[in-house]
Amino acid sequence: MKTISSPIVDPLMDISTNVRENDFFNVDDEGGAWSDAHANFLSSLSEAETSDLMKCSHRLNLKSRDHLFQAGDHSNDVYIVARGCIRLFQISSTGKETILWFSFSGEIFGMAELWRGNGRQIHAVANEATQVYSISRKNFTHFLGAHPEAAMKAIGILSARFRALGNVLVGLTSDNVEIRIVRLLIRLAAASSGTRCCAGSNEGELCVNVRLTHQDIANLIGASRQTVTTTLVQLRKQGAVRTVEHHIHIVRPDHLRRLLEQAAA
Amino acid sequence: MKTISSPIVDPLMDISTNVRENDFFNVDDEGGAWSDAHANFLSSLSEAETSDLMKCSHRLNLKSRDHLFQAGDHSNDVYIVARGCIRLFQISSTGKETILWFSFSGEIFGMAELWRGNGRQIHAVANEATQVYSISRKNFTHFLGAHPEAAMKAIGILSARFRALGNVLVGLTSDNVEIRIVRLLIRLAAASSGTRCCAGSNEGELCVNVRLTHQDIANLIGASRQTVTTTLVQLRKQGAVRTVEHHIHIVRPDHLRRLLEQAAA
DNA sequence: GCAAATTTGTCATCTGGACGACAAAGTTGC
DNA sequence: GCAACTTTGTCGTCCAGATGACAAATTTGC
C-alpha cells in the first residue's frame, strides 16, 4: 500500500489503495488472473521509471462518453489511466458491441495495438469523467528499450490480460447467463476495488464501482439486455446484490460463491 | 522467404515458407491479426539472437497426444515449435474443453504463463508427432533482457495473440455456428500455410493442414459436435470444402468469403 | 424544471442449437 | 488381421435465451 511521492506525479494520481488481499477474489478462476490483469502498471514502476515515462507523456481530460480512439484510427499512443475508467470494446461485423475490458486508475491500455500498422481494432471510450496520460508509440518503445524491467512488467500485464480473456472465452462457452453475470460482478469488484466507493457499504459487502447499464453487462457477457435484467432482478430478490447510486454492491459474496460452486458440480 | 543458415539451428527447422501474402486471408478480421498472431517468432530473430536462444534450449520429441504440460503444472518453460503442431486448451469447471490456440512451426508458446507463480492454467498437447525447443523461464527472461529487440518481438506476438483472442470472443457472441466454422477454417488455413500439404490440392484450393476431429472444431468454436458435423456436411454439399487425408481443403474460398459478407449484411 | 432521451422491468413468442441415442464407417494397437 | 475404440452421420426432443413490444421509472440536457 505505497503512496507515490515522486514530484512529477500528478496529485490526481492518488491510487494508493489497490489492495486485493481479499480472500474472496481467489475464488475466481484459478489464482486471480483477473486481478493480475488489472495490475497497476504505473505504481509497479520504480521512481526513475515513472519519472522517465511522465516526462514524455501528456495529460488528457475526458468527459463521460468521450471517444479516445475508434477502430480504424491511426493514432498509435499508449495510455495510462490517471483517474476514472475507460471502456474498451469492439464492434462486430453485425454491429454488436462486445466490451473486452475496463481500465481503471494506474492501468495501461492501447499497448496491444502498438505493433501493427493497420490502425486500431478496438474502441476506447471514457466510462465516466476520466483523465489519462498519453504516451506516443515512439516514446513508449524507447522507454521500454531503456528500461528492461519495465518491459518485463509490460509483458507480464499483457500476459495476464491474455489469460483473463481466455477465461472469459471459456466461460462464454460453458456457463449460462447467471453464472457469467456472477463471474463478471466478482471480477469487476476486484478490478474496481482500487477506487473507493462513495456510497455507504455495509459489513462484508463488495462494491462494483463501475457505472453499468444492463446493456453494458449484456455486451460484456454476450447476452441480451432482457435476460440480464431478469437475472439481476432474481439475484436482487435472493438478497445477493443491491443497487446503490448507479452501481451494484455484492451484499452476500458467499451466496455468489456458492452459485459458482454449484455450477461447477 | 529467408532460410535460416545459422549452424546451431537444427536441420529439422526448415520453416522457410511462412508466406502469407495470399490476398484471401485479409478478408478475415480487419488486417490479419490472426496471421500476425501466428508469426514465426524464431525466423523473425537475427542470427545472433537465434544462436543465443538455441544455446540455452534443448529439444523434445513428442508423439501425437503427448502432454507437454497441464493446468496446475509448475513447470515454467517457454517452448518453440520446431516441427509439428501443439494444441493449447483450457478445461472449464464443468469439464468442457476449449481450444485456445494451435502453435505451428517456429511459433513460441507458454509465454503468457511465465510471469505468474501459480503454475499453468492451460494444457499443451502434441496434435501430431512434434518437436519443440524448450527454454527455461530463467534463460528466457535473461535472453529478453539481453536482446531488447527480441523482447519487442515477444510483446508484438503476445499483442497479436491477444487481439486474435478478442476477435474470437466477438465472433462467439455475434456469429452463428456456420460463420464461426467458416472463420475458423480460413484462420487455420492461414496459420498452417507454412506447412506444406502432402495431398494433392487443386488450383485455388486452400489447405487447412491440421488434423481435426469434429469434436476439436466444436471445442474451438464453442459448439456441439453434432452441430459441427451437420454444418460441415452442408458446406461439403455446397462444394465449398472437401476432406483430404484427414484434413480439410477449402475448395472454393470465394464461396466462404461470400458467406462471411452475407452474415455481415 | 420540464421535455426528450435513456434505462429498467415484464410480457409472450419463437428458434438455434444442445443433448441423448444409435448405427455405420474408420482407425489403432496388439 | 481382428477386436476395441474413436469418429462420423443422422435422428427426434427440448429449452435457454434471443427478439419484439410496450409501459414505467429514471436521467439528461437545455
Image (cartoon, coloured by chain):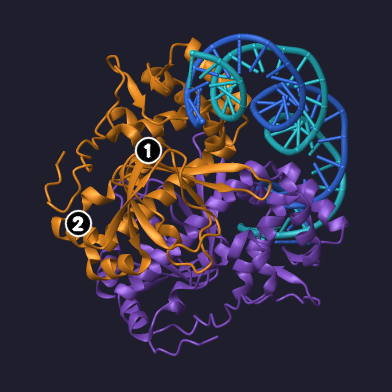
Chain colours: A orange, B purple, C cyan, D blue
| Res A234 → quadrant | top right
Element class at badge 2: helix
Instruction: Report the number of discs.
Output: 2
Observer able to see residue B75: no
Q: Chain of mark 1?
A: A
**Sequence-first disc among 2 and 1:** 2
Q: Is residue A45 above or below residue B41?
A: above
Q: Is residue A205 above or below residue C25?
A: above
Q: Is residue B210 above or below residue A245?
A: below
For the N terminus of chain A, the quadrant is top left
| Res B186 → quadrant | bottom right
Left/right placement of residue B92 relative to residue A78 reads right
Element class at badge 1: loop
| Res B64 → quadrant | bottom right
| Residue at 40%, 31% in the rendered image | A210
Left/right placement of residue A36 relative to residue B66 reads left
Residue D14, horizontal then vertical, whole percent = 75, 22
10 Å crowding of disc 2: few (<14), some (14-19), many (20+):
some
The residue at which mark 2 appears reads as A50
Q: Are marks 2 and 1 in contact (CB under 8 Å)?
A: no
Q: Amino acid at mark 1?
A: Ala
Residue B65, horizontal then vertical, whole percent = 55, 58
For the residues beneath circles 2 and 1, the answer to whether they share a chain is yes
Q: Amino acid at mark 2?
A: Thr
Q: Which mark is residue B72?
A: none
Q: Which mark is residue A129?
A: 1
